[in-house]
Image (cartoon, rainbow, N blue to C red):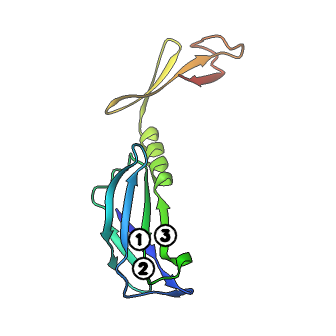
Amino acid sequence: MWIVSFFSNNGVPKTGLIPTLTIIDVSDNSIIINAEAMTEMNNGFYKYDFSAYDDMKDYTMISDGTATLPAAERYVTSSNSLFSDINELNRFNKSSMLITGTVLRAYDADGIMQEWDLKDKSGDASDVNIYRRIKK
């Protein structure tokens, strides 16, 4: 996955920088990438090839454009949380569903993804006249 950051100096795209990138795994706060150099593209854009990217993890990122930039333009922050949510939704949409008794289960290649209790309109467990599902 390419991580791209834009830097400017007083609103003008800044070239010739050697910005660094730090990436943190949100689940355990571990630093995955620590102040590694980004590559200049053009017109103030810089990129980093995050080859260790796992689309099932949430990351937060900070790019440091160096102390040569004004404080308000030095740092660029980002997160992939939206991408993780979309990937999880795609995974869920490709899952198989099976009702066993009064429980609905979603399966993927790794096994059970999610389970729900099935209820009728009165709130009683039911496998007929299902009115709602409640996440287990």
For residue 4, the mark is: 1
Q: Earlier in the sequence, mark 2 or mark 1?
A: 1
Residue nearest the observer in this picture, 122 or 17 = 17
Confirm or deny contact between disc 2 and disc 1 (CB under 8 A). Answer: yes
Compared across the picture, whether 60 is left or right of 110 comes to right
CA gap, disc 2 and disc 3: 11 Å
Circle 2: residue type: Phe
- Residue 106: image quadrant is top left
CA gap, disc 3 and disc 1: 10 Å
Q: Report the residue marked by disc 3.
A: 76
For residue 45, the mark is: 2
Q: Residues within 10 Å of mark 1 (few under 14, many from 20)?
A: some
User: Which residue occupies 46% across, 40% down?
Assistant: 93
Circle 3: residue type: Val
| Residue 112, position as x, y percentages in the image | 39, 26
SS at mark 3 in the image: strand
Circle 1: residue type: Val
SS at mark 2 in the image: strand
Compared across the picture, whether 12 is left or right of 52 comes to right
Q: Earlier in the sequence, mark 2 or mark 3?
A: 2
